[in-house]
Image: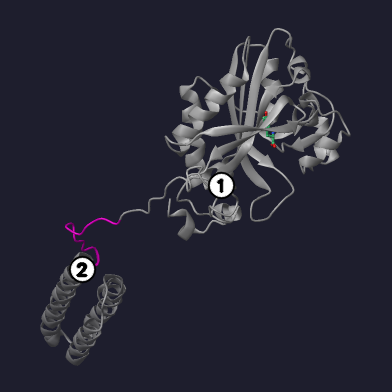
Amino acid sequence: MKEEFEQLKDLAQEALKSVLDRDKLEVLKIEFLGRKGKMAELMKQIVNVADEERKLIGALANEVKTGLESAFSAKEQELAGAEEAGRAEKEWLDISEPGAWSKEGHLHPVTTAIGEISDIFARLGFACVRAPEVEWDYYAFESLNMPPDHPARDDWETFFIADGAQTAQGKGEKQGKMVLTPHTSNSQNREMAKGKLPIRMININRTYRRQSDVSHTPMFHQFEGLMIDQGVTIAHLKGVLDYFARTYFGAERKTRLRPHHFRFTEPSFEIDISCGVCQGHASSDSTCRLCKAGWLELGGAGMVHPNVIRAGGLDPEKYTGFAFGWGIERTLMMREGMQVDDIRTLYRNDLRFVKQF
Ligand code: DAH
C-alpha cells in the first residue's frame, strides 16, 4: 500500500503541473481529494492492511493527504495571482492620453442660406409661416388666378398626387387635385384666409418640379414674401428688395424691376440684381464673365392681382399688396465666391463639396 500512496501523490503532483486555470484545478481537486476521490478510495483500503503495518500506512496516508492539500492550495494561490496580474494588463488605461473627438459636421449651405434669408426679412417685420408641401391645386394654382386648364399652369412642371390622396380632404379644404407644390406662392391665399391684417410674411419651403439639369433639381427651395395692407405700393416692394440685396449680397448691390408677366400679379416684374463681378458696369453680354450686361436675374415679383386678393377674402378696393418669390439655391449660387456651376452639386451628398462652406 505504501507504493500505492506514493504513486497517487506523484500522479496528483504531475497533474497539478499542467493545470492553467482555477476551474480545472477544482475538477482535479475533487478527483483526488473529494469525498469519493482517489485518496478517499485508497484510504478505505487501509482496514485490509495487516495490524502491525496499519499504523505506519495510516501515518503515511495522512502525510500524503496533507501534502496534497497544501499543494492544491499553493496552486490555487498561484493561479489567482496570475489572474489578477492578467487583469491589470488587460484593463490598463492611459489616463493622460488625449480623448478621441467625435466628428463634427455643420449645416448644409442651403440650410444656412434659409436661416440668413429668414433673419433679413425678420428685421423688416416679416413673420415666417409655412404652407404645406403637398397642396391642393386650389392654393397652388386656382386661387392664384390660374383656373383649371389655364395654359399658364404649364410653366410649372407639376407633380400631381395619385387619386388616393384626394380622399384625405379635411373639413373646409378645397376640393380638387393635390400636387407637390411647384412654388411657394401657395402660401398667399392661405395667409389671407387667416384674416389677420396687415400681412407681412415669408414662406420658405421645399418645392417640386419635373426638371433636372445644370440649373434645376426636382426638389428645390423657394421663398415667398407677401405684404398686404392699405396703401402698399411698388415703392415699398422696391425698398424691401433693395434692403435684401444690400444685406445678403453686399452694400453696393442694388435691384431693378423689369416688366414681366405672372397671372397672380399686376403689374408683374422680374427682379434683377446688379452683378457682383462687374458691379453692374458691363455694357454688353460679353464684357462680364458672370452676368448679362451688368445684371443677374433673381426672381419674380409684382403687385398682388385683385383676383388673388378677392380669392383671399379681402376687398381689392381697400387692400393692396406686393409679393415676390424665387429659389434659395439660385440665390445662394449667385453669391460671390460660390462658383457652383451645376445646381445638382448641392444635393450630391459629396462631403468634399459640402465641407467647403
Ligand atoms: N411663384 C413664381 C414661380 O415660382 C415666382 C413668383 C413670381 C412669386 C411673382 C411671386 C410673384 O410672389 O409675385 O415662378
Q: Quadrant of residue 101?
A: bottom left
Name the residue nearer the viewer: 253 or 118.
253
Q: Is residue 74 magenta?
A: no
Task: Report the number of numbered marks.
Answer: 2
Relative height, residue 332 to residue 51 (above, below): above
Report which residue position mark 2 lands on.
89
| Span shown in magenta | 89-100
Measured in 3D between alpha carbons, the distance from the residue under mark 1 to the one under mark 2, in whole angstroms, is 78 Å
Q: Quadrant of residue 144?
A: top right
The percent coordinates of residue 185 (x first, y second) are 69, 30
Residue 128 is at least partly visible in this image: no
Mark positioned earlier in the residue sequence (1 or 2): 2
Q: Is residue 93 magenta?
A: yes
The percent coordinates of residue 266 (x first, y second) are 73, 24
Name the residue nearer the viewer: 159 or 13.
159
Report which residue position mark 1 lands on.
283
Residue 77 appears left or right of 162: left
Inspect the image, locate mark 1, and give the three-letter code of the amino acid beneath it: Ser
Residue 129 appears left or right of 263: left
Mark 1 residue element: loop
The chief SS type of the magenta part is loop
User: Residue drawn 25% across and 55% down?
Assistant: 99
Mark 2 residue element: helix
Q: Quadrant of residue 31?
A: bottom left
Marker disc for residue 314? none
- 1 or 2: mark nearer the eye: 1
Residue 21 appears left or right of 316: left
Q: Residue furthest bottom?
A: 3
Question: Which image quadrant: the N terminus?
Answer: bottom left
Residue 177 is at least partly visible in this image: yes
CB of mark 2 near ligand 1 (< 8 Å): no
Residue 281 appears left or right of 47: right
